[in-house]
Image: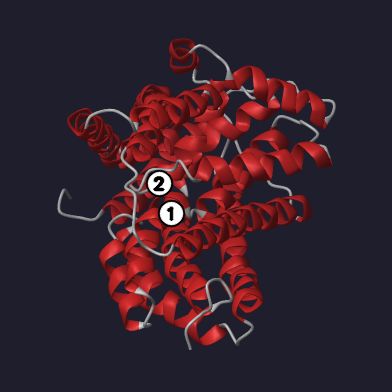
Amino acid sequence: MTRMGLVPQILMGVALGAVAGMMFPAVAEQLGLLGQLFVGMLKAVAPLLVMVLVMSAIANKHESGSDGRKTFATIALYLVGTISAATVALLLSQLFPQTIALSEVAQGSPPAEVTSVLVDVLFKLIDNPINALLTGNFLGCLSWAILLGISFRKAPDSFKLHLQTIALGMTDIVQLVIRLAPVGIFGLVCFTVATIGVEALASYASLAILLVCAMLLVALLVNPAIVFFVTGKNPYPVVLQCLQESGVTAFFTRSSAANIPVNLALAKKLGISEELYTVTIPIGATVNMAGAAITITVLTLAAANTLGLEVSIGSALVLCIISALAACGASGVPSGSLLLVPLACSLFGISYEVSMQVVAIGFIISVIQDTAETALNSSTDVLYTYAVDRGRVGGGSS
């Protein structure tokens, strides 16, 4: 059992949880305690993870002698692609609304108009950092992480090295928690099936299908359109090559960070400028998170639909931007984007407890969601770097 990969273990947890929930409903509450403990660990680690990772990434960002215009253009393209992916997820969620089974029904406070969303965001951004950590205010954690990260760029290298060590330590803790996901998911599925019924799993399947469809649309339609706009050439040969040589390995490793060596080798094979790709590929593994933006947007809207919250057009547009920015803070470990869902949920007054239930549901479908998400994220790193290198910025090469 311990030698099996995480994906087979999660599948086994889902299957055994469903069987236990149907056959032993009397003890489902006791078994459900395993799921509650798993969600509790996620709630404990998520805010601190966001703050430490973002702060360390900014403080330890190295200056480079590469072509500044091309590097900036690639990062800008990362942001455009991530926002575009969130928009696709929003449109599909509006066309095919999703709901999910929650173990407790809670009420959110839907914003009346976009201005109320912006005001709420501003007040959360200036929250006390300690209070932000204690209450799970992810927007406050993010703003303080950015400010401290910028300030710490002037700190001695030894201090920044210690900060990076803390970030690596937090990542190790998250990986440990994720290793417990099969047991936690077993408890969650068992309790859900016993109390709500096996129909709840059907809603999870529908949610997973919507996520994968959104990622396929971005990979096969949106990304090629962006590359064609930048280069003016047929994008599909390089799009398919990136999916085949980068996306497939990322699909199985489920880690953008682990796929960096593969992307560096592919960038060299494509003839991209070494000065460019040695900078943009590592940055892309951190901030280019189109798949994460899709996951955050879809799960947030599913939670809003479940609670009966009406999402206005203005609020939806703000959600796309927040999802894109939140995705940039996703850690490079498997299912790292799920821990950013509460940040987006907070826009609609959804309580931290309920949003962490949504995160737990995300882990149930992560067997499908996270593999497809990482494949999209990682393959796009090379694709956009190639587009800028061959595009009009700085005079692309032939």
Q: Residue at x 63, y 47 (%)?
A: 298
- Asked which secondary structure carries label 1, the reply is helix
User: Marks 2 and 1, how far apart in space?
Assistant: 6 Å
Q: Is residue 342 left or right of residue 152?
A: right
Q: Which mark is residue 370?
A: 1
Task: State the image quarter where residue 112 is shown.
Answer: top right
Circles 2 and 1 in contact, beta carbons < 8 Å: yes
Q: Residue at x 51, y 45 (%)?
A: 327
Q: Is residue 315 left or right of residue 105?
A: right
Instruction: Between residue 200 and residue 41, name the one nearer to us.
Output: 41
Mark 1 crowdedness (10 Å alpha carbons): few <14, some 14-19, many ≥20 = many
Amino acid identity at mark 1: Asp
Q: Is residue 351 left or right of residue 315?
A: left
Task: State the image quarter where residue 341 is shown.
Answer: top right
Instruction: Between residue 221 and residue 356, name the one nearer to us.
Output: 221
Disc on the earlier residue, 2 or 1:
2
Q: Residue at x 45, y 36 (%)?
A: 339
Q: Which mark is residue 335?
A: 2
Whether residue 299 is visible here, answered yes or no, is: no
Amino acid identity at mark 2: Ser
Residue found at the very far left of the displayed protein: 3
Mark 2 crowdedness (10 Å alpha carbons): few <14, some 14-19, many ≥20 = many
- Asked which secondary structure carries label 2, the reply is loop
Instruction: Between residue 174 and residue 63, name the one nearer to us.
Output: 63
Q: Compared to 263, does 94 lie above or below? A: above
